[in-house]
Image (cartoon, rainbow, N blue to C red):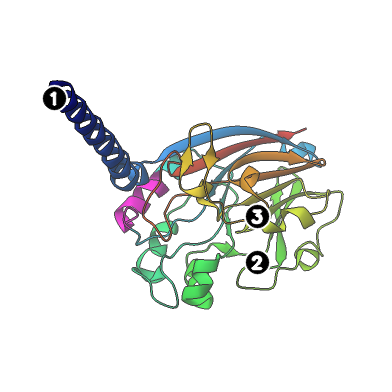
Amino acid sequence: MVSEKRKHKREVIISAAIFLVLLGLFAYGVLIEPGMLVLREQEVRVPHWAVGLNHLRVVVLSDLHVGSLHITVEKLHQIVEEVNQQQPDLVFLLGDYVTGHGGKTALKPEAFVKELAGLQSRFGVYSVLGNHDWWYNGEDVRRELVKAKIHVLENNAEPVYINGATLWVAGLADSWTRSTDIKAALAKVPETQSCVLLMHNPDSFKDVPGSVSLSLAGHTHGGQVALPFIGALVVPTKLGSRYARGLIEEGGKHFFITSGIGTSIFPIRFGVPPEICVLDIFAK
């Protein structure tokens, strides 16, 4: 009888301990990690990189989802200050500035784009729009970004002149909500010149020609939940979990996916803290 009581007591203690651990992990994923901000620096060596461009330092931001649980206008101000401290040559914004669906958002773009107007870089800030921006109202988001002197690209490219060399910055329309046209985006870009291609969703990576020096995307949030030894549980790209985040070299092409800043659907991050990405780009 005593043995049975001890066994039952032990089972209760173990069950309670497991419950508390799971509760603690859940609380961490909802209350702590989504509010963090990690500076992620990475050296990237790419092909077709002009000598004059030499070492280019760029900051990549994506999926801000301003108005979500942890991303307030005040938090965005902190993000902008952190970006400016890196003294970037260029800043690339990869979409999903708003949060919400179907025209409803917690915060309208005019309420926070004025913070993005504070981004400082030597050669400008270039952007594309994401699926949430178009679900809200893409033209409104575009208009506010342009007011803030942020270049908005959709299936087109613009030249940036740096130290006597030309860097083309191209941008794709969001593949979930618009008509993505890589050919149109690169129509003006000579194959022999350096080019960085911006997109929100990485699904278009497979169609990018080898003449593009580096392609950048967001959208995946790194899966938002990534477990040790397992990785991301769900990644919103048809390319699979390998494309959840980070630098990928495949077939001579170079891709980089950032896990972004905010959260979508569920206000949780676990093993994938919000990140500001600083890429130091060199010729390969």
Q: How many marks?
A: 3
Was residue 79 drawn as part of the magenta stretch in this picture? Answer: yes
The amino acid marked with disc number 3 is Pro
Disc number lying in front (1 or 3): 1
Mark 3 lies on a secondary structure that is helix
Task: Residue 145: tell me if it is visible.
Answer: yes
In the picture as drawn, the residue positioned furthest to the top comes out as 3
- In contact (CB < 8 Å): disc 3 and disc 2: no
Residue holding disc 1: 1
Q: Magenta-highlighted stretch: main secondary structure? A: helix
Residue 142 visible within the image: no
Q: What SS does tag 1 mark?
A: loop
Q: Dot 2 lies on which element?
A: loop
Which sits in the foreground, 256 or 14? 14
Q: Earlier in the sequence, mark 3 or mark 2?
A: 2
Give the number of the disc on residue 175.
2
Instruction: Name the quadrant containing residue 12.
Output: top left
The amino acid type found where label 2 is placed reads Ser
- Residue 13 lies left or right of residue 191; in this view the side is left
Name the residue rendered at 48%, 32% in the picture: 228
Q: Which percent across, then down, holds residue 48? A: 81, 42
What residue does disc 3 label? 202
Foreground: 1 or 51?
A: 1
Which disc, if any, is residue 144?
Answer: none
Q: Is residue 207 above or below residue 279?
A: below
> Does residue 65 belong to the magenta stretch?
no
Disc 2 from disc 1: Cα separation:
66 Å
Q: Are marks 1 and 3 in contact (CB under 8 Å)?
A: no
**Magenta segment:** 69-81
